[in-house]
Image: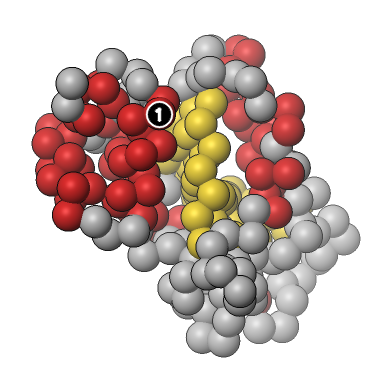
Amino acid sequence: MSLTKSILEGNRLALARLLTQVENDLPEGHSTLAELFPYTGKAHLIGVTGAPGTGKSSLVNQLALQYRKTIEKKVAIIAVDPSSPFTGGAVLGDRVRMRDLSGDEGVFIRSMASRGSLGGVAQKTASIVQVFDAAGYEIIIIETVGGGEGGAGHRPPICHDAGDHPTGVVPAGLVRPVPGATRLGVRWSAGATVFE
């Protein structure tokens, strides 16, 4: 059975295999993604960004739980983490805070290393979104690297471009933007602001 057919039939192992191929920029990932492209364009995207420690992962966890409990939508979460200086892989801190979702077959959490990309997301995030979209995930939540965790020169997060609903998470008690936050684009690119 082809990888494309397996993914369209909901095979999670095939989906994980393709996500790795796409993220690693392998030729077989490119060809499968091209085959899946006609099945994209249906998912609703939610981008969540904010400074480190503001509760982005907690918010994503609660959003996914609500979507699963109230309207039973399939939810994919792309958690972009800083890259490990040792392996280059994702640090995986975000997944630890989403334990409530483990074991739910209607939720797929994928951690991605930023791999030095600026803007809060990894270079292949848009392609990973297309894979999840084609695989039938109706809600795709993209949690960016925390503002400032991606290194110097962090440009405004992709959420204001890619998400149907860009959301900024701001720590409680913050009346005015932190100096420099406007340069990061965290405060002003959000369509909604959540105070944790």
Position of residue 131 in the picture relative to residue 183 (left or right) = left
* Residue 27 shows up from this direction: yes
Q: How crowded is mark 1: few (under 14 residues within 10 Å), some or many (20 or more)?
A: few
- The residue at 24%/56% (across/down) is 26
Q: Nearer the viewer, residue 196 or 30?
A: 30
- The residue at 47%/70% (across/down) is 115
Name above or below for residue 142 compared with residue 25.
Answer: above
Name above or below for residue 89 compared with residue 85.
Answer: above
Of helix, strand and loop, which one carries label 1?
A: helix
Position of residue 4 in the picture relative to residue 96 (left or right) = left
Residue marked by disc 1: 13
- Residue 134 lies in what quarter of the image? top left
Residue 152 percent across, percent down from the top left: 57, 86
Residue 123 percent across, percent down from the top left: 36, 65
Name above or below for residue 143 compared with residue 105.
Answer: below
Residue 61 percent across, percent down from the top left: 68, 35
Q: Residue furthest bottom?
A: 152
User: How many labels sit on residues?
Assistant: 1
* Residue 59 shows up from this direction: no
- The residue at 47%/62% (across/down) is 121
Q: What residue type is labelled 1?
A: Leu
